[in-house]
Amino acid sequence: MPKKIVVIPGDGIGKEITDGAVAVLQAVDKKYKLNLDYDYYDAGGTAYDKFGVPLPEDTLKAAQQADAVLFGAVGGDKWDNVAPDLRPEKAILGLRKGLGLYANLRPVKTMDALIEYSPLKPDIVRGTDVMIVRELIGGVYFGDKCEEEDYNGTKRAWDLENYSIPEVERIVNLAMQTAQGRKGKVTSVDKANVLATSRLWRRTAAQVAAKYPDVKMDNMYVDNCAMQLAINPTRFDVIVTGNLFGDILSDEAAVLGGSIGLMPSASIGEQTSLYEPIHGSAPDIAGKGIANPLGTILSAAMLLRYSLQADEAADAIEKAVKDVLSQGYRTADLYSEGFKKVNTEQMTQAVIANL
Ligand SMILES: NC(=O)C1=CN([C@@H]2O[C@H](COP(=O)(O)OP(=O)(O)OC[C@H]3O[C@@H](n4cnc5c(N)ncnc54)[C@H](O)[C@@H]3O)[C@@H](O)[C@H]2O)C=CC1
Ligand SMILES: CC(C)CC(=O)C(=O)O
Ligand SMILES: [Mg+2]
């Protein structure tokens, strides 16, 4: 039986980068006989323009029934003024909730070939290898919210941050197990000096950690973590944190690898999982054919590894990405004089040639 991959390109650079990842998947499929089959669905502003909603029922249903989902990105200025519940970003939030994707794994690894591209000093970023484990379907992104209400003679808006003990236990357990396959160290990141949700997070994390004597856990406030990522990133192995902090810290950590365009992610659920680069729809470069497809191609490698247990094919993609960078191929986000400047399509073909 073929394995069903639901592809959701979304908006902006979404089509360009998912085209690249699917071309690479098709190439490894030929070599490793994976028997992959693709179905395409709309989401985001593109779906809003066609159907009046950012996440059509058909898209969610297909994703729920898929062996794995490959996602591009959603959003763009064009939809900035649509009703909050119809914003393109509701599509990815709805997919995360609808598929129960409770954990977002965001690996950040500095490749030697790219050491000069980080705005940080080479001696600081060399050897960085962090796995950010971000809780993905709780916290302030999914709490009750109020767009506007009267309050003390003025208007206010609010978003509710809330976490339950089982939600924290589930994500911290996954972080501990992830660390067991790595260097055995977890840093739990919160703001327990201020937030009640963070104090519950910290207490619960300690209880979970006690079940894993082979893993060392420490706690860090999120503001300090933001600084430590910039001055001492190699001190981290696994970082586990909530939805909002994980979103922000992972964009910051992306600069350690050279470009956000390189960063993949896996969003893990009980039934199916979704794979997407950590960046957005990059409206500033959309349609120009210059987006870096490597974050999405590496997300496809994570798809093969986590959803299809096709480790050999995943290894082949990851090695091909390293090879093209060592050979000097660079999209615009990583280009400097002396290197081979390529567009999205040429970078994709370079990866395929190295498989
Ligand atoms: N999962 C998703 O679908 C996400 C969607 N968004 C949405 O994307 C839209 C744009 O958001 P921004 O804050 O501008 O973040 P962004 O990640 O789209 O772009 C930030 C900067 O990084 C660059 N960049 C991003 N991906 C790149 C790639 N593959 N190659 C080369 N350069 C790349 C962009 O050109 C831009 O300068 C918004 O509507 C936002 O809500 C943002 C993050 C995640
Ligand atoms: C809802 C998304 C736009 C949040 C985000 O920035 C992300 O998941 O990286
Ligand atoms: Mg983000």
Image (cartoon, rainbow, N blue to C red):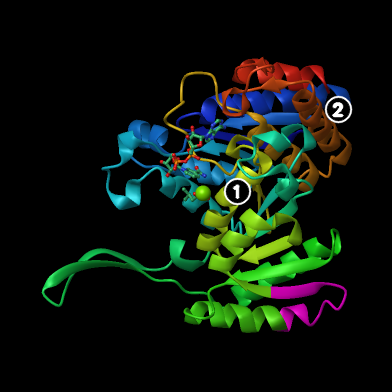
The boundaries of the magenta stretch are 207-218
To which residue does mark 1 refer? Answer: 64
Residue occupying the point 66% across, 65% down:
240
- Asked if disc 1 is less than 8 Å from ligand 1, the answer is no
Residue occupying the point 80% across, 73% down:
216
Please, is residue 159 above or below residue 81 in the view? below
Question: Residue 164 placed where, x, y %?
Answer: 55, 78
Residue occupying the point 38% across, 36% down:
76
Is 70 left or right of 213, judged from the image as shown? left
Residue 347: name its quadrant.
top right
Question: Residue 148 placed where, x, y %?
Answer: 22, 63
Q: Is residue 346 visible?
A: yes
Per the image, label 2 sits on a secondary structure element best described as loop
- If you read the primary sequence from the N terminus, does the residue marked by circle 2 or circle 1 appear first? 2
Looking at the rendered structure, which numbered label has been put on residue 166?
Answer: none
Residue type, numbered disc 2: Lys
Per the image, label 1 sits on a secondary structure element best described as helix
Is 283 left or right of 36, judged from the image as shown? left
To which residue does mark 2 refer? Answer: 33
Residue 182: name its quadrant.
bottom right
Distance from Cα at disc 2 to Cα at disc 1: 24 Å
Question: Residue 318 placed where, x, y %?
Answer: 79, 35
